[in-house]
Amino acid sequence: MNNSEKTVNPKGNIQNLKPYKKGQSGNPAGYPKGQKNRATILKKWIEVAVKFKDPITEEEISGTVEDKISLSLINKALSGDVQAIKEINDTLYGKIPDTQKFNHTTKGDSMRPLEIIVQSKEQGEKFKELIDYVSKLS
């Protein structure tokens, strides 16, 4: 089938493409001008001063909403919540990068991880033989 035989959707035709007029929006019903985004609104409310009960000391204290959230997270971590502990560690020390990325799509390298495992096992066996040999000497 050549190009002249193909049926073309008129709405997908290049001749139907028209640039926007100057000053015309590509999405007229989109985000209204002056509308604050979620991050701006959260920053405003997270800095508000509040009084609350310290979940650790049980005392009435004053602080920000951010302080209250942080103390609640610490309290969850102290009770053993693993996700809270992870969140605190990630915030304080940074997330641990994922160094073990397995890419099996590269042609010719698909067996490489298996080769590494086999080599590790062989080296482990050789190491064990060496330890056995050295222990017999003493």
Image: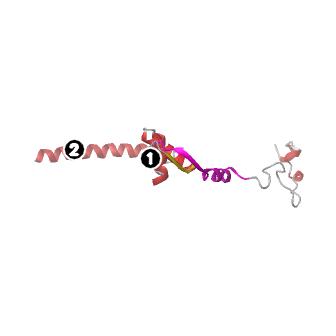
Count of marks, rendered view: 2
Instruction: Please name the residue shown 67% across and 54% down the image.
Output: 40
Residue 55 in the image, given as x and y percentages of width and height: 48, 42
Few, some or many C-alpha atoms within 10 Å of disc 1 (few <14, some 14-19, many ≥20)?
few
Q: What element carries label 1?
A: helix
Q: Is residue 48 left or right of residue 73?
A: right
Q: What residue type is labelled 1?
A: Arg
Q: Which amino acid does label 2 sit on?
A: Glu
Would you say residue 24 sits in the magenta stretch?
no
Residue under numbered circle 1: 112
Q: In this view, does 81 lie to the left or right of 47?
A: left
Res. 102 in view: no
Residue under numbered circle 2: 129
**Which of the image's four quarters has the N terminus?**
top right
How did the renderer colour the structure?
secondary structure
- In this view, which residue lies farthest toward the bottom? 22
Q: In this view, does 62 lie above or below 23?
A: above
Q: In this view, does 125 lie to the left or right of 98?
A: left
Q: Is mark 2 on a helix, strand or loop?
A: helix
CB under 8 Å between discs 1 and 2: no
- The residue range painted magenta reads 36-55
Residue 17 in the image, given as x and y percentages of width and height: 87, 53
